[in-house]
Image: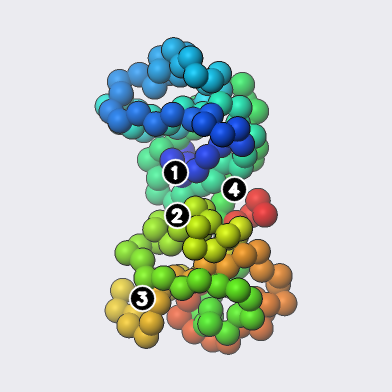
Amino acid sequence: MDVDPNVRLSSMPRNYKVYGKVNDCAAKCAAETNFTCKGFVWKGPNSGCVLHGKLDLPVVMQNASKWFLVDLDCTSSKPCWWSVNATNIDPTSIGASKKAVNVKNHNQCQALCLLGVLQPKCRAYALTDDPFYADGYNCYLFPALKQNLISSAVSGKFSLYHNQCY
């Protein structure tokens, strides 16, 4: 449970397929002919279904996600949670490259980090949960951060999340 359905689980290009509503994701996996389906992510009957080839990338978790992974060969790596590394910080005071954006919610900030488009090799993000925050951006994307950079951050209204697999 709690799997992020937007994460690629196979390093092989085009080794995944996305379906809209399906009744039986396992049957779709078994019938796949473009690659050998080794696992799938879905929410159950009449939901979306994401097929994956060889599961050789980290399984990224997402709080309160209703999606789950079925790993047919039990070969996936341990799940990667985004742990809270620091609270009550000001991300603008962290001396590392960063990209700032406004997001609608926690999951959107995490998804932008995972996509790695705005911040290549994004491994951490800072987010404020204050719905009335109006002093600029509410989400900051970072590469992997060393503890000394995190510790040097000044006080603020953000929490810093770091991907445990990197």
Of labels 2 and 1, earlier in sequence is 1
Bin the neighbour count of mark 2 within 10 Å (Cα to Cα): few under 14, some 14-19, many 20 and up: some
- Residue 107: name its quadrant: bottom left
Residue marked by disc 1? 6
| Front position among marks 4 and 2 | 2
When the figure is inspected, residue 27 is found, relative to residue 163, above or below; the finding is above
**Residue 65: x, y in percent?**
40, 45
What distance separates the C-alpha of mark 1 from that of mark 3?
A: 26 Å
**Which mark is drawn over residue 80?**
4
- 157 on left or right of 73: left
**Residue 84: x, y in percent?**
56, 65
- Residue 130: name its quadrant: bottom left
Of labels 4 and 2, earlier in sequence is 4
What distance separates the C-alpha of mark 2 from that of mark 3?
A: 19 Å
Residue marked by disc 3? 130
Looking at numbered disc 3 in the image, what kind of residue is underneath it?
Asp
Residue marked by disc 2? 111
Q: Is residue 110 visible?
A: no
Looking at numbered disc 4 in the image, what kind of residue is underneath it?
Cys
Bin the neighbour count of mark 3 within 10 Å (Cα to Cα): few under 14, some 14-19, many 20 and up: few
Looking at numbered disc 1 in the image, what kind of residue is underneath it?
Asn
Name the secondary structure under disc 4.
Answer: strand
**Residue 21: x, y in percent?**
28, 28
Of labels 1 and 3, earlier in sequence is 1
- 73 on left or right of 52: right
> In the image shown, does 82 or 34 lie closer to the viewer?
34
What distance separates the C-alpha of mark 2 from that of mark 1?
A: 8 Å
Looking at numbered disc 2 in the image, what kind of residue is underneath it?
Ala
Is label 2 in contact with label 1 (beta carbons under 8 Å)? yes
Of labels 2 and 3, earlier in sequence is 2
